[in-house]
Amino acid sequence: MPPVQKLNPPSAQSAEPFWLDPRKRAVLFQAFVLGLVALIAWYLVTNTVENLHRQKIATGFGFLQKEAAFEIGESVIPYSAADTYARALLVGALNTVKVAFIGIVLTVILGTFIGIARLSGNWLIARLAAVYIEVMQDIPVLLQLFFWYALFYETLPGPRNALNPLTGVYVCNRGLIIPAVDPHPAWRIMALALAAAMVVAWVVRRWARRRQDRTGQAFPVFRVSCALILGAPLLAWLAMGSPRAVTLPELQGFNFVGGKTLSPEFMAVLLGLVLYTAAFVAEIVRAGIQAVGKGQREAAMALGLRPAQVLRLVILPQALRVIIPPLTSQMLNLTKNSSLAVAIGYPDFVSVANTTINQTGQSIEGVALIMVVYLFFSLSTSAFMNWYNKKAKLVER
């Protein structure tokens, strides 16, 4: 029998070259691409700074501390022409946030309603929803903004002949004028009570779900949550003396005094963005509902649930897993489309930034600020929706 030869471990000289290892090769390629991108960015930045210096154009963000010297038609926070460019840009950013936030809330509500109506068994309701979706999707959003803006300024009457659909509410070419509550500490306490009630309702919902999984007994979460959310602010209002002081708008001369005025520019932007984006949200809701199998609906009805309960407790929770990802895209589109407000004179961030660029000549810095701000808005919206998507997705056991 021949002697057994021992196998020696491979030496370092016989090891596989690093360029044949897929993982090492991938790291090498990524480092090369990253270095190439950094080199290109360094060249562009240095070349731009050198050209600006050669033309004696100031660079940097020092202009933000200078006096803006221009007025802004409407703002969420106090502002005057004596404030700095930084505060002016903050006012524009808050105006954009106001339009985007209110627009997203109204769009989700209207889009959900239209999407459910699109699947209605009533022929007329279903056809009206279909016509709305087709018409709104086919008209460009910028054209819709122009339409609503022209409607306020060209069609509606002046303040002296303003439409008065409700007591204290007026509609004219100056915008929508509504009553406004007088400042009082109670409103802040009510807001805190509302926030606390929402937290408690969330805790109750989690407790009720665990209790039902453990015992099979259902808990009236919806009614309890409504009682908390409505009752807590009401109790705070009663505890703070029940303030009821309201300032009603009154016509004095050629305009209204008192109340709260929503400008035609704001109303045109809000209506245009909401009505346009809601048409796409409606199709997303319709597709999500139809993605749920018919057996789910039939099983729920066999258990004795009413149609409204079937939709709220069985269909929509399952449809959300299909609805949320494309809904996130529509929310981002609404936020980015709000930059079109500059076309009708609404002082959003783009409009204020353009005015700043025209006065200071800091075009590169101004465009960079616009890009950073809208990137922040988009990433914040996307992060929130991704978090909600993870909470709503089906977890397999």
Image: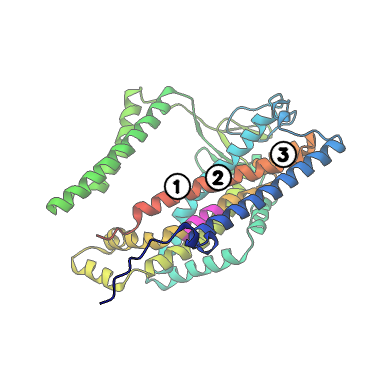
The residue under label 2 is: 377
Question: In the image, what residue occupies the spot 34% across and 31% down?
Answer: 193
Predominant secondary structure, magenta span = helix
- At label 3, the amino acid type is Glu
Q: Quadrant of the C terminus?
A: bottom left
The numbered disc on residue 365 is 3
The numbered disc on residue 129 is none
Label 2 sits on a secondary structure element that is helix
Q: Are marks 1 and 2 in contact (CB under 8 Å)?
A: no
Q: Earlier in the sequence, mark 1 or mark 2?
A: 2
The residue under label 1 is: 384
Residue 283: x %, y % from top left: 47, 65
392 and 237: which is toward the camera: 392
Magenta includes 143?
A: no
Decide: is 189 above or below 355.
above
Question: In the image, what residue occupies the spot 69% across and 48% down?
Answer: 39
Question: In the image, what residue occupies the spot 40% across and 32% down?
Answer: 191
Magenta includes 327?
A: yes
Relative to 218, is 56 on the left or the right?
right
Residue 194: x %, y % from top left: 36, 35
Mark 1 and mark 2: span between their CA atoms?
Answer: 11 Å
| Foreground: disc 3 or disc 1 | 3
Q: Which residues are drawn in magenta?
A: 326-333
Give neighbour class at mark 2: few <14, some 14-19, many 20+ (Cα, 10 Å): some
Q: Earlier in the sequence, mark 2 or mark 3?
A: 3
Using the rendered image of the protein, determine whether residue 162 is visible from the camera's viewpoint. no
Relative to 330, is 290 on the left or the right?
left
Mark 2 and mark 3: span between their CA atoms?
Answer: 18 Å
